[in-house]
Amino acid sequence: EVLIPLPDRRLVLRTPRGLEVFSGDHLILATGARELFLPFPGWTLPGVFGLGGLQAHLKGGLDLAGRRVAVAGSGPLLLAVTRLLLRRGAEVVGPFEQAPRNRVVRFAFHTLTREGGLGDLLRHRRAALRLRCGAWCLEALGTEHIEGVRIHTRTGVVRERVDALACAFGFVPETRLGRLLGAETRHGAILVDDTQKTTLDGIFAAGEVTGIAGKNAARWEGRAAGAAAAGAKLTASCARRLLRGRQFGRRLAGAHRLRAELRNLANPDTIICRCEGIRLRDLAPEWSPREARILGRLGMGPCQGRVCGPILAFLRGASDGSQPRAPLSPMTGAEWAALDDILSSEGDSRS
């Protein structure tokens, strides 16, 4: 795990053996993305999962057979999680996709006819047939554990009894390391050229850190970045694949663009920052992301703003203007002492 970037393309890593300093002539950033959660009343109740989080728990052995599980949010992961739940014997409520049906159908048709998506469609056909568009979760109901959900649909608000809820609204590129290194961003992703080179010499980026476009695009971006870092010429075939991947990413973003109504789900008592227990009423409407951090402690907890930073940016209708700080994950006092010893032994005057 990368904790701190140092000058001259060096990184402080947390490894099973302790802290180590890695250096290289070139770096390829492939830090991926994290789920975007949008707060609504009850979203912090036990039994409410992110889509990716529930998917990981199911693959790790979580047994929800016979349980009623609501699936809501936005993006293709809705279908993947629904399919997995059905295969594991759960009773699925939904899935509910916030995007309107016409955009989702148009995107699915393009994926099927232009992107070779027939295999994906066949794998997810049971889930796709259940998909309800223009619908989203208004509230998770319960006291000690989720007991039900209220869902906005095109025909009105419905209430369903559930044992669990999986909900997330797409992904946010994990750009903190790149920004700490000094790489420029555009539209919330690390900016790269046609060879996946960032705005920094010797540093490349590949995958969802450069924009959400799926596994196929990430694979070809990784090949391009590796070739460029090794000094090899990009093949015409790879260049075409990169272009297709970027076009697919733009279509994906357009199809699942988040509707403005989602900004109004939280009420004054709704928790925005889970780490610090900060509610919407605790944040002055005029505060910038930096002011929310300094004056309201938003993003000062263990996640360091990875969850609540994008939430605040979406609620305010602005980009996340906060600047990440090292370390990227909390460090113990013993680790700080070990780092000081490592840097001192290297004669690093900047330690």
Image (cartoon, rainbow, N blue to C red):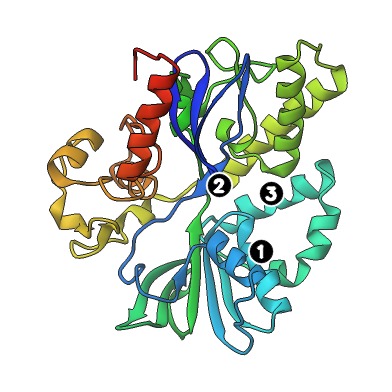
Q: Mark yes or no: residue 187 visible.
A: no
Looking at the rendered structure, the secondary structure element under dot 2 is loop
Taking 297 as reference, is 31 left or right? right
Amino acid residing under circle 1: Leu
N-terminal of the pair, mark 1 or mark 2, is: 2
Q: Secondary structure at mark 3?
A: helix
Residue 308 percent coordinates (x, y)? 33, 49
Crowding at dot 2, Cα within 10 Å, few <14 / some 14-19 / many 20+, comes out as few
292 vs 313, nearest the viewer: 292
Q: Give how far across and how far down residue 255 sits, in percent.
A: 59, 46
Q: Amino acid at mark 2?
A: Pro
How many angstroms separate mark 1 from mark 3 (CA)?
16 Å
Tell me the tag on residue 79. Answer: 1
**Which residue type does callout 3 highlight?**
Arg
Instruction: Rate crowding at label 1 as few (under 14), some (14 to 19) or many (20 or more) other CA atoms within 10 Å.
Output: many
Badge 1 or badge 3: first in the primary sequence: 1
Dot 1 lies on which element? Answer: helix
Residue that carries the numbered disc 2 in the rendered image: 16
Q: Left or right? Give the position of 80 relative to 121.
A: left
Viewer-closest of 234 and 76: 234
Q: Who's the residue at 61% across and 18% down the image?
A: 24
Label tally: 3
Q: Earlier in the sequence, mark 2 or mark 3?
A: 2
Compared to residue 277, the image places residue 32 above or below, namely above
- Does the image show residue 299? yes
For discs 1 and 3, the disc positioned in front in the rendered view: 1
Query: Taking 325 as reference, is 260 above or below it?
Result: below
As displayed, is residue 256 above or below residue 47? above
Give the quadrant of the C terminus.
Answer: top left
- Residue at left offset 32%, top offset 29%: 323
- Write down the residue under mark 3: 106
Q: Nearer the viewer, residue 99 or 287?
A: 287
